[in-house]
Image (tube, grey):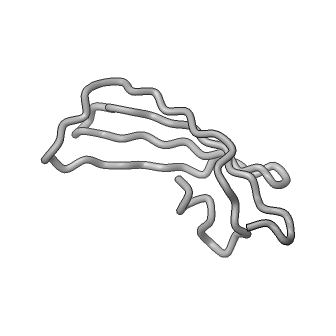
Amino acid sequence: MGRLSNAGGRPVARTAYLHVNFRGITPIDVPLRVEVRFDREEGRKRYLTGALYDGASVTADAEALFVTLLPGQR
């Protein structure tokens, strides 16, 4: 989610919060799919959502808020 938040030439942002809902057991040693969506930007705030899939089953979903850094912040 952080990579998408900072992609496309946008100014650097940091995670303000990341909320994850675990919906089911996530298997290991199998291919998984991650989908992340940039929902909206309001001033310095960027809202993203995402999900982790095992086939058609959602094993986890998340929502995050990223905040653009002010000049001089790192």
Q: Position of residue 67 (x, y in %)?
A: 74, 52
x%, y% of residue 46? 71, 50
Left or right placement of residue 28 versus residue 22 in this view: left
Would you identify the image quadrant in which residue 55 lies? Answer: top left
Residue depicted at x 36% and y 41% = 52
Left or right, residue 13 beside residue 4? right
Q: How many marks?
A: 0
Residue 6 lies in quadrant: bottom right
Q: Residue 39, position in %: x, y?
A: 64, 46
8 vs 48: above or below = below
Residue furthest out toward the top: 23
Q: Specify whether 15 is left or right of 59.
A: right
On the image, the x and y values in percent for residue 70 come to: 85, 63
Residue placed farthest to the left in the image? 29
Residue at x-position 31% and y-position 40%: 53
Q: Which residue does the image show at 81% across and 54% down from the upper left?
A: 44
Q: Farthest residue to the bottom: give it.
A: 9
Q: Quadrant of the C terminus?
A: bottom right
Q: Residue at x 70, y 60 (%)?
A: 13
Q: Is residue 4 above or below residue 32?
A: below
